[in-house]
Amino acid sequence: MEKNSLLNLQEVVFSSKDAAISKQLSKLVAAGKLRKISPRIYTSNFDELPEIIIRRNLYLILGKLYPGAILSHRSALEFQPTSAGHIFLTYTYTKKVSLPGVMVRLLEGPGNINGDNPLSGGLYASQLERALLENLQPSRRPGPESKVCLQEEIENRLEQVIRTRGESGLNELRDRAREIAPQLGMEAEFVRLNSIIGAMLVSRPSKLLRSPLSLARAFGHPYDAGRLELFEILWSALKREEFSNMPEPNISPQAFRNFAFFEAYFSNFIEGTEFEIEDAMRIIEMQMPMPARSEDSHDVLGTWKIVSSREEMQITPRSPEELLDILLHRHNLLLSARTSKKPGQFKDQNNRAGETYFVDHTLVKGTLIRGFDFYQALTHPFARAAYMMFLISEVHPFLDGNGRIARVMMNAELVSQNEAKIIIPTVFRDHYMTALRRLTRQRDPNAYLRMLLSARDFSATVIGEDVETMKQHLEVSNAFRHHEEAQLRIAYPQSES
């Protein structure tokens, strides 16, 4: 061994029974090249606290100190020490070992079996099925010092399995747990696991369940918990704000229908259904699609038929069930010509936009139902409109037409209270998309609300008994321009960094 091999500046160095290595360690410590931070553990890092170094190299240290040990119980699900600093290993004996910043809890139990995962050096981690069985063992010590997590957390982990691998994946997990339970002496734990899975799949009584997520699945309405947190963030921001009223300026039937034309035109333009303004006017006037662009024409017509009907646009949901019914009805009207997009049906496969993945198709109904709770707690028309549009946009419940339906639902909230509707002209498109992404990815509702308020202020200036008058106003305000900055000041950053 070369003299300086220990100084190939590994951050953590271990003592050894080898006399030569032991002697070299002593020399390096005496020379100020290494320092001892715990029994058998040395470091070349003199700048940071021992507990920080231990945490950063934890799995390496555990594998070296306890070869063949298994990261088990709650640690095999959480992969980090508890809030009390405890980490749990299955080993050849039971003992507590204190390291700087970490309490290692060694638990006597079976060694690694086929399917357990190698981590670092001689350390393994319990495979998921084993970890679930371990976490169903009895424990007298509650809280962050307990070796097991709460049953609710186990159910939430099983819910993740269903979402990513489907019910067949959960059944495969159950079969694997049944197979390994006798090897581990955990037959009783498997009985509990089997009961929980059965309750989630509605083959056992739901009273066994404790997690809101698994209870929702048992009752037929599983939901996306992460999206519920996001909806709550927007809801809280809306509850904190005071919004002014803006009465509908286009009161007469003709003015209302004129505005509805531009509402439909811009809503489709944003989604890529682009027409020259004169062609779109002709489609609406003649109530006939352009032969060369039948489906696109029907999209514009379908949107216009919804938003030009004051009667239809005064309908808002009074219950979660009404929300689902209204969405399906309006989607059927909107996309009647696109049978491949299954008009009037919720999506049966997942969708995404760029790096944004929308709600899993199996969680659409449950997420809308749970999201309705926040909606009904809002009172101001603008707050309800802003929340409703984001709810539909974020869930993305259909194969196509989600943005248009979201904006229809937003404006229905305003029409029902005789408030001015909102259009998103092409010049606003980048601001609109950036604000939505910012709320989704960075959980910042402020840009979204400022964008909608600015769009509302602009939309309230689009008034007229004559559609040509409205068109001229929009042309003057640059609303038809593709890549120009909005004339209105929307004070939020374009960057999403």
Image (cartoon, helix red, strand yellow):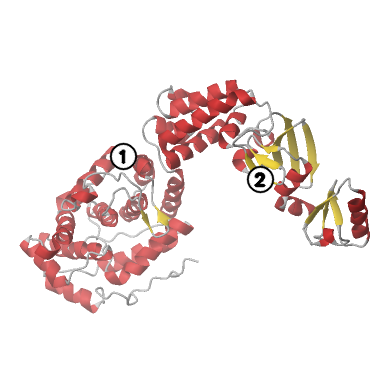
Mark 2 sits on what residue? 119
Q: Residue 457, how many percent across, how many down?
A: 30, 67
Seen from the viewer's position, the closer of residues 434 and 29 is 29
Q: Which is nearer the eye, 346 or 278?
A: 346
Q: Which residue is mark 1?
A: 320
Q: How many neighbours does mark 1 have within 10 angstroms: few (below 14), some (14-19), or many (20 or more)?
A: some
Which quarter of the figure is the N terminus placed in? bottom right
Could you tell me residue 251's position as x and y percent?
A: 16, 60
Q: Measured along the vertical axis of the image, is residue 270 above or below residue 184? A: below
Indicate the quadrant where residue 355 lies: bottom left
Q: Residues within 10 Å of mark 2 (few under 14, many from 20)?
A: some
The location of residue 374, given as percent across then percent down, is 39, 45
- 394 or 57, which lies in front? 57
Amino acid bearing label 2: Leu
x then y, percent, for residue 438? 44, 61
Amino acid under disc 1 = Pro
Residue displayed at 68% across by 26% down: 140
> Can you tell which mark lies on residue 146?
none
Tell me where residue 369 sits by quadrant. top left
Q: How many marks?
A: 2
Q: Is residue 127 left or right of residue 269?
A: right
- Furthest residue to the bottom? 476
Q: Nearer the viewer, mark 1 or mark 2?
A: 2
User: Could you tell whether 316 is left or right of 357 in the image?
Assistant: left
Direction from residue 141 to residue 413 in the image, left or right: left
**Secondary structure type for disc 2:** strand
Residue 477: in sight, yes or no? yes
Residue at image location 13% in from the left, 60% down from the top: 294
Whichever of callouts 1 and 2 sits on the residue coming sooner in the sequence is: 2
Q: CA distance from mark 1 to mark 2?
A: 46 Å
Mark 1 lies on a secondary structure that is helix
